[in-house]
Image (cartoon, grey):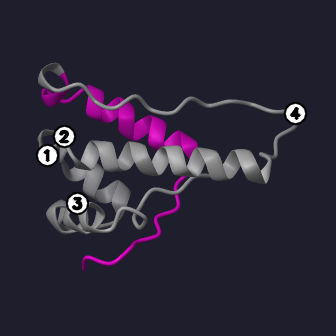
Amino acid sequence: GGGPRLVQRRYRDFEALHASLLRRPAAAVSKLPRLPGRRYGTGRKLSDAFASQRQAALQEWVRGVLAMPEHWCAELAAFLGVPELADIAMGLALSPGGGGGGGG
């Protein structure tokens, strides 16, 4: 459906998807949005503020990829947990505050 979705993924899942998208022919024609960087603080646990900022940045990255239909593929659909990318892309376009992504 077109409502907001919660998709929880680890940062390494975003890295793997980004690498997979870069290997596709569309990457030679259309530049992918830059994946937000991985930053380490002290210790293994991220601060709540940093985790929230990174989640927002990763959501924007997903929206950026979804805005480029030439990058739509089975890997992206599986990552988002949807059968049809057109449905979720339309939902994200209509609701600027809602949507997929997730951090971790």
Mark with earlier residue (2, 4):
4
Q: Is residue 94 above or below residue 26?
A: below
Determine whether label 1 and label 4 are within 8 Å by CB: no
Which residue corresponds to the image point at 12% horizontal and 22% vertical from the top-left? 29
Amino acid at dot 4: Thr
* Vertical placement of residue 78 versus 63, above or below: below
Give the label on residue 69, or none: 1
In percent of width and height, residue 53 lies at 62, 46
Name which of mark 3 and mark 2 comes first in the sequence.
2
Per the image, the residue denoted by label 3 is 89
What secondary structure is found at the residue carrying circle 2? helix
Estimate the spatial distance between the alpha carbons at disc 2 and disc 1, rounded to whole Å: 5 Å
Check contact, mark 3 vs mark 1: CB within 8 A: yes
Residues under numbered marks 2 and 4 in contact, where contact means CB atoms less than 8 Å apart? no
Q: Label 3 to label 4, Cα distance in Å?
A: 36 Å
Q: Which residue is mark 4?
A: 42
Q: Is residue 6 left or right of residue 54?
A: left
Per the image, the residue denoted by label 2 is: 71
Residue at coordinates 30% horizontally, 63% vertically from top-left?
Answer: 92
Q: Are marks 2 and 1 in contact (CB under 8 Å)?
A: yes
Verify whether residue 7 appears in magenta. yes
The CA span between labels 3 and 1 is 9 Å
Looking at the figure, which quarter contains the N terminus? bottom left
In the structure shown, which secondary structural element does the residue marked by tag 1 occupy?
helix
Q: Residue at x 51, y 33 (%)?
A: 36
Front residue of 48 and 13: 48
- CA distance for labels 1 and 4: 39 Å
Number of numbered markers? 4
1 or 4: tag closer to the N-terminus = 4
- Looking at the image, residue 57 sits to the left or right of residue 89; the answer is right
User: Which one is closest to the eye, mark 3 or mark 2?
Assistant: 3
Give the residue type at disc 3: Ala
